[in-house]
Amino acid sequence: MPERKLSYQPLDHKSDTGFSIEAPSLQRLYIDAASALTDLMVKLDLIEENEKRTISVEAPNKEQLLVKWLNEILFLFEKDKFLSKKIVFDFFDGKKITASLFGEFYQPVRHGHVSEIKAVTFHQLELGMRSEPEHSFFAKVFLDL
Amino acid sequence: MRSNALQLGSRTLTEIKPGIWRVEPQGKMRVGVNIIASKNLILQIKDDKSIEQAANVATLPGVLDPVLTMPDIHQGYGFPIGGVAAFHEKTGVVSPGGVGYDINCGVRVLTTNISVQQLKNNKMTKRLVSELFDVVPCGVGSKRKDLELSMGQLDSILADGASWAVKNGFGDLSDLDFIEEKGRLIFADPEKVSQRARERGHNQLGTLGSGNHFLEIQAVDTIFDKAKALAFGLEPDHIVIMIHTGSRGLGYQVCSEYIELALNTASKYGIELVDRELAALPLESVEGKSYLGAMAAAANFAFNNRQIISFWVKETFKRHFPNIEFKILYDICHNIAKWEEFHFPSHRNSQRVCIHRKGATRAYPPRHPSLPQPYLATGQPVIVPGDMGRFSFILAGSANSMELSLGSACHGAGRELSRAQAKKQARGRSISRELEEHGVFLKASGRDTVEEEMPEAYKDINEVVEAIRHAKIASFVARLKPVGVIKG
């Protein structure tokens, strides 16, 4: 897949934060959402790809899968301080994701200060498809800080 | 429209008692909502969804009349922040989102016998702030290398609450009397805390975290009620320590996992999801009991967290002030669900209910049997932290707090600006220098947090606590002013 620049918009919320994101495919939407979440903690440009992690998540529907997948990214960061830069899906069917994550461990001096994200929430969660102006998928996600 | 009524969209708010506004049930609401606020505070939230969120809570099964909101109410996830709701023990539900991700986030105040002048004369404030910043891990990834826990120790922490810390040398047995529920929710069931929650949290005991969590050195600035201040150990100009933190990653993980479980079981239990973050579990169900056990275990972790941080604070001060004496004024939860008893007008006898306080503080009246002896005459100390530049308040629960607000009061000032708005306003300024010019030394691990948490980001706390006083829920005891702030 050709490299494309990650594009997401931070969303304003009184006590917390969030982001909206658009991607050409559902699979890409999940990958980009994970990268956006990481980018809110540590700029992706600062992350190197010298470690690998494999994760697998399942959920009964696309929305729950998105929240669970993103919470898994948070979990990896909080437990192991792992930051992913490149994500490859080994399996994806809208209810299950198996992914290989390439990245490195957080180093405060090089990566800078990180504001803690407690959780990815279902608050005003949106996940959908657009056909205009071009076929794309979009999501809105709020985070508890 | 009558002068004691307000119209917010389709909802009419009627002032039923001084400072208490009633929204009668409509649509799917099973009960009404009582809003404790001044007219001005209500107008400040008219454009957000907090009252809608309180109305959504009022649709949940087994909810008892009324759902309440506190004067620091603002929009949250599912429940509004500043929301209180009680549920019938047989027909009611427990909502993991209604407790929140930071289970037993709470505040503790330690009183001391040293004055702010003693600190200033020795030019000690800045030094102490710096030392406390080094001693109490704050910010992402920081931990104490001398507090490695085995999984067996973690089980004891989850089961025993703050008494674990006391048994292990972090404080005195008498400390426990001055912690809500004596620092231990007895219905904790460590087995219901997943391995993942343990992995996420076990390195975080004794850490402050980031965001709105803080450790502050404050001075008693004003005494409003001499007798109660004396009973609380608050003397003019004396230093107190305020600690605001919770159950850290362990609690966040418990909440996330049980929201998912509640979503997956909603149709099985016929619970209509008006908002996915309000997903709830019947209190009588296996899943509901499991959540309560895990939530209480996470709450016990949080009690330990504040107890251990207190110990390190004391050690740090003692190096410079060998004769310093510390006492816990009180330690209270503000994100919690637990069993309490109340009289409801609809029932003859007192009811054991599962009360949710989401961004709200318990505020028990004088003579309540769960209060420690020194507070039986005064009512429970209610700790209301303000922003890091202005004031915090100590109140005392009033005689009618059980009837007026289910023994609950506000938990803080409440945000006025979003984080993005705050950062915009902070552009080109040095918030820490501005604070220093006002006599507040700040040390934080990140500039972003400081900007997001700057004083103007919060409502005027005077207006919030005045609404509580006006509604006769709690009375003023003392006002505290920060002199040193540690942020993650």
Image (cartoon, rainbow, N blue to C red):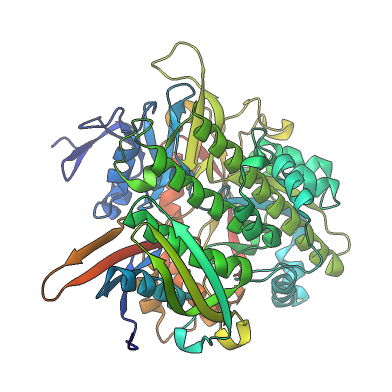
Residue B42 placement (x, y as % from top left): 29, 48
Q: Nearer the viewer, residue B129 or A70?
A: A70
> Is there any visible trace of residue A79 in the rendered image?
yes
Q: Quadrant of the N terminus of chain B?
A: top left
- Identify which residue is drawn at 45% across, 55% down: B413
Name the residue at the left extreme: A132
**Of B326 and A44, which appears nearest the observer?**
A44
Whole-percent x, y for residue A51 in the image: 59, 81
* Quadrant of res B35: top left
Left or right side of B206 for B332: left
Query: Which residue is most to the right?
Result: B322
Looking at the image, residue B19 sits to the left or right of residue A48; the answer is left
Residue A120 in view in this figure: no
Point 33% across, 60% down: residue: A94
Q: Residue furthest front?
A: A91
Give the image quarter of residue B137. bottom right
Decide which of B126, B475 is in the foreground and name it.
B126
**Against B82, is B15 above or below?**
above
x, y percent for residue B380: 61, 36
Q: Residue at x 69, y 43 (%)?
A: B232
Q: Is residue B465 found left or right of B170 in the rendered image? A: left
Residue B406 position in % (x across, y down): 47, 31
The image shows residue B375, relative to residue B102, as above or below, that is above
Where does the C terminus of chain B fall, quadrant-wise? bottom right
Vertical comparison of B354 with A142: above or below: above
Q: In this rendering, would B328 be left or right of B477?
A: right
